[in-house]
Image: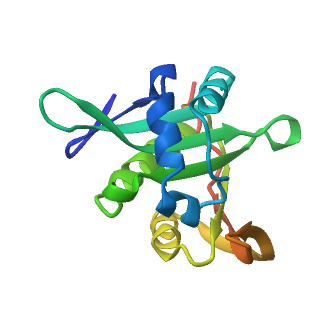
Amino acid sequence: MTEFPMLTIRAAEPGDAEALAEIGNLPGVRHGTLRMPYDSRSRVERRLAASGSNHFLVGVIDAGDGLKTVVAEGGLIPGQRRRSHVGEVFLIVHDDHVGRGYGAAILQALIDIADNWLGLRRLELDVNVDNLAAIRLYQRHGFEIEGTRRGDALRGGVLIDSHVMGRLRDAPGRTPS
């Protein structure tokens, strides 16, 4: 487990499904991401159970009286075959906990897995062009806007644009024999 001020980062577990479904259905999360509304606990459970080589992390805070609350989720989905050097990243933060550094902490943990444990050379993600806080967060962690998809997603009956962002790094070093 990784500690961040008042935050514990750990692997997502099946017992987190209800909290993750709740977070995914919050208005701010739906507005700022490409998620569909009305995600169910059972659908999140299936995603977590079928994770395979994917890495899903949650950020948990102590809400007092020993009660732990999930406030963020991030994921790293490694590519396959000729894209095995690539990982897709996603990140969501509970509407009531935005701006506290929780997203940055989970993103840093995902980057650590990608760089230091999987040796991925490229990370990529999609972000709505009007999600300026997320764009700034990704840029602080080395992601660059590589392109814009016009009319990419339908949100509230209106087509919106999204940016494709990527982060490239050199191949991992090798310890001399």
Q: Is residue 60 above or below residue 23?
A: above
Q: Is residue 169 left or right of residue 86?
A: left
Residue located 45% across and 72% down the image: 133
Name the quadrant containing residue 155. bottom right
The quarter of the rendered structure image containing the N terminus is top left
Q: Nearer the viewer, residue 65 or 103?
A: 65
- Point out residue 54 in the picture as x, y percentages from the top left corner: 64, 31
Visible residue check, residue 89: yes
Q: Residue furthest left?
A: 65
Q: Quadrant of the C terminus?
A: top right
Q: Residue at x 66, y 25 (%)?
A: 46
Judged left or right of residue 30, residue 150 is right
Residue 149, quarter of picture: bottom right
In terms of depth relative to the viewer, which is nearer, 177 or 59?
Answer: 59
Question: Whole-percent x and y of residue 24?
Answer: 53, 48
The colour mode here is rainbow
Q: Tell me residue 168's x, y (percent).
A: 65, 58
Q: Identify the residue at image location x=76%, y=67%.
A: 153
* 173 vs 153, nearest the viewer: 153
Write the residue at 49% across / 38% down: 20
Q: Give residue 2's position: percent from left, percent from top.
A: 32, 34
Whether residue 145 is situated above or below residue 102 in the rendered picture: below
